[in-house]
Image (cartoon, rainbow, N blue to C red):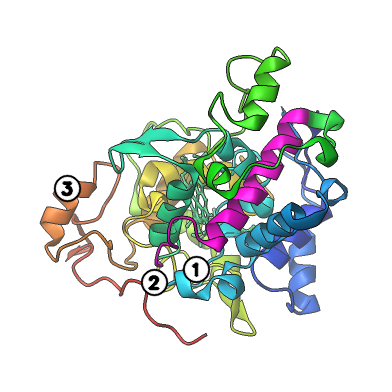
Amino acid sequence: MLKLSYSSLLVSLALISAGSVSATEADANKLAVQDQLPNQTAETYPRPPGWDKLPEGEFGEKVLRGYKNFVDTQSLSPQYTGNGLNCVNCHTDAGRKENSAPLWAAYMSYPVFRAKNNRINSFEERMQGCFMFSMNGASPDYGSDALIDLSAYAYWLAQGTLTGEDFDPKDMAVPSDAELLKGGKREDFPFMKAYLDKGGSKEPALVGRAYPTTPEPEQAPDIARGKAVFEQECSVCHGENGEGQQVNNRYVFPPLWGPDTYNWGAGMQRVNTAADFIKHNMPLGQPNKLTDQQAWDVAMYLDTRDRPQDPRTKGDVAETRKEFHGKTSYYGTEVEGKILGSESFPNHPNKPQ
Ligand code: HEC
Ligand code: HEC
């Protein structure tokens, strides 16, 4: 167990992860400033394994490819992405950071029932969802190499994180690809079984999973107040119009609305989910800087801006709203004189690579 602080490692990982391995020094300096701000995550969370714990051989190669795909999805999975994002943009620190939907907690939470599609979802199916909606892309096929590699990365992170300092990759059971894709929440899963045999609780404690709930604020969220928060706290990195910033054709700071970001079917377009993410992860490197009210206000501002269409639509916005969108989504509602979703950007456009 170790106190996680915003080290320069995290900041440089964010840089790499934003797809900007070739980012200029000026960008690096801009981010380094963030590093000097006081650490505001005082809680203690389990710690993911370091690269010295990478297993040798074929499985280690899968883990490494999965990691690369996660932080630079644009380069490794161009056929599956329809916007400018990488997985890591919403699962920060390469999917390792607590309260940022970390992969180690996610992996041990599947298979599980999801209301979104009304069935039990395997880990690979959950990732397909993020490709389709958050990445505005095309789902990789069941059992495809990309999903196997990403599962291997998540499995390794889960094992290392939950085993703690005793973790030795040489002792790690190597599941078959088919097993790996299902997720770890199964008594017959090698790691889960070992954990239970050791006298672990019924399920590993997954503190830090997902984005913690940010309570609804006293006042209903408000676009004008949200815009003011955006201009003060966010636009310096994400651009005046939420368009992000690119270096060498890759986003260093990801776009928040417009054609190149998450679509109207994504989790992040729900105001509560965006508020939860923002409260605990934004501004970058300053979790909990915003009040709950500010997080909800700015979340509403983002999620009332247009973005790529909901890929589940059959053409009728009102129908799509009724079928797929609850009260936490503004899709299909009238905002600033326009029905959101009526003129959205395309799904999975064939963008030049
Ligand atoms: C635009 C933001 C965004 C991007 C980009 C994104 N995701 Fe997600 N992802 C989310 C949100 C939001 C959730 C739901 C978190 C929650 O339950 O609160 C989620 C959930 C998940 C989960 C399940 C987490 C859990 O604990 O149940 C997995 C696994 C996952 N994403 C994998 C991926 C992968 C792989 C990629 C890249 C192909 C990706 N995500 C890209 C926003 C994103
Ligand atoms: C110091 C620069 C910086 C500031 C300031 C900042 N962000 Fe971010 N933001 C980032 C980076 C970089 C990422 C991608 C994180 C990663 O890849 O590790 C990101 C990711 C995001 C994402 C998920 C990815 C996407 O494109 O949708 C959202 C939403 C977001 N920021 C919202 C905000 C909001 C709202 C604010 C203001 C309260 C804010 N950010 C302030 C740098 C910043």
Magenta stretch: dominant secondary structure: helix
**Residue that badge 2 annotates:** 258
Left or right: where does residue 288 sit relative to residue 275? right
Queried whether the magenta region covers residue 158, the answer comes back as yes
Q: Can residue 226 be seen in the rendering of this structure?
A: no
The mark closer to the camera, 2 or 3, is 3
Ligand 2 quadrant? bottom right
**Residue that badge 3 annotates:** 323
Q: Quadrant of residue 98?
A: top right
Give the secondary structure at mark 1: loop
Q: Few, some or many C-alpha atoms within 10 Å of disc 2 (few <14, some 14-19, many ≥20)? A: some
Queried whether the magenta region covers residue 138, the answer comes back as yes
Q: Quadrant of residue 155?
A: top right
Q: Is residue 304 or residue 103 the one in the foreground?
A: 103
Can you say whether 177 is above or below 138 in the image?
above
Give, as a three-letter code, the residue at label 2: Gly
Give the secondary structure at mark 2: loop
Q: Residue 273 carries which label?
A: none
Q: Can residue 118 be seen in the rendering of this structure?
A: yes
Most extreme residue toward the bottom, as rendered?
Answer: 352
Specify start and end residues of the magenta stretch as a single range. 137-163
Earlier residue among tags 2 and 3: 2
Can you say whether 140 is above or below 201 in the image?
below
Give, as a three-letter code, the residue at label 3: Glu
Answer yes or no: disc 1 within 8 Å of ligand 2. yes
Task: Determine the residue positioned at 39% across, 60% down.
Answer: 132
How far apart marks 2 and 3 lie (CA) works out to 24 Å
Labelled pair 2, 1 in contact (Cβ < 8 Å): yes
